[in-house]
Image (cartoon, rainbow, N blue to C red):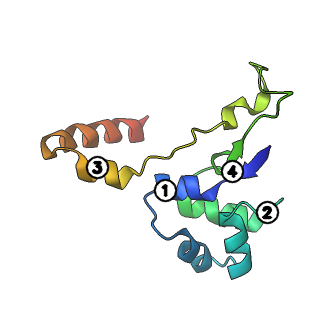
């Protein structure tokens, strides 16, 4: 099943209150609630664009695919790239718990990834 999983990418971006952020970009309250609780079958393109601009991502980053029993064993399925890990680590929490002497290494790594 293909779904929109906004909570995952908001968590990856370290955004604590995704509902408020969705309201700020013009998403209505009911739609924001439905988007965050996986109760939508489609999303307006203008909302999709605004969310991608806010999160600095592309539409595929917002989608998640859980294969059905029929497609679970197909190794080269086109949607395979949209399978996500079930748990999303909170980057802010990881950084808070990292020893201070390691933060320089993280910063260097991130700078290198940003320049790729």
Left or right, 11 with reference to 67: left
Name which quarter of the figure residue 51 lies in: bottom right
The Cα atoms of the two marked residues, 3 and 4, are separated by 27 Å
Question: Considering the image in quadrants, where does the C terminus appear?
Answer: top left
Could you tell me if the residues under marks 3 and 2 are in contact, i.e. CB atoms within 8 Å?
A: no
Q: Residue at x 76, y 20 (%)?
A: 76
Q: Residue at x 69, y 48 (%)?
A: 63
The Cα atoms of the two marked residues, 3 and 2, are separated by 33 Å
- Taking the image as drawn, is residue 25 in sight? yes
Could you tell me if the residues under marks 1 and 3 are in contact, i.e. CB atoms within 8 Å?
A: no
**Label of residue 59 in the image:** 4
- Taking the image as drawn, is residue 28 in sight? no
Residue holding disc 3: 95
Of labels 1 and 3, earlier in sequence is: 1
Of labels 4 and 2, earlier in sequence is: 2
Of labels 1 and 4, earlier in sequence is: 1
Left or right, 61 with reference to 71: left
Residue 33 lies, in percent from the top left, at 68, 73
**Label of residue 11 in the image:** 1
Q: How many marks?
A: 4
Of labels 3 and 2, earlier in sequence is: 2
The Cα atoms of the two marked residues, 4 and 2, are separated by 15 Å
**Label of residue 40 in the image:** 2
């Amino acid at each position: 099943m293909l779904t929109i999983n906004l909570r995952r990418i908001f968590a990856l971006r370290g955004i604590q209150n995704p509902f408020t952020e969705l309201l700020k970009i013009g998403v209505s309250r009911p739609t924001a609630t439905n988007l965050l609780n996986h109760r939508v079958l489609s999303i307006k393109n203008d909302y999709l664009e605004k969310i991608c601009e806010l999160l600095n991502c592309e539409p595929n980053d917002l989608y998640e695919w859980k294969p059905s029993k029929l497609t679970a064993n197909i190794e080269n399925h086109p949607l395979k790239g949209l399978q996500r890990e079930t748990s999303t680590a909170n980057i802010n929490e990881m950084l808070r718990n990292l020893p201070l002497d390691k933060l320089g290494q993280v910063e260097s790594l991130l700078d290198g990834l940003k320049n790729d």
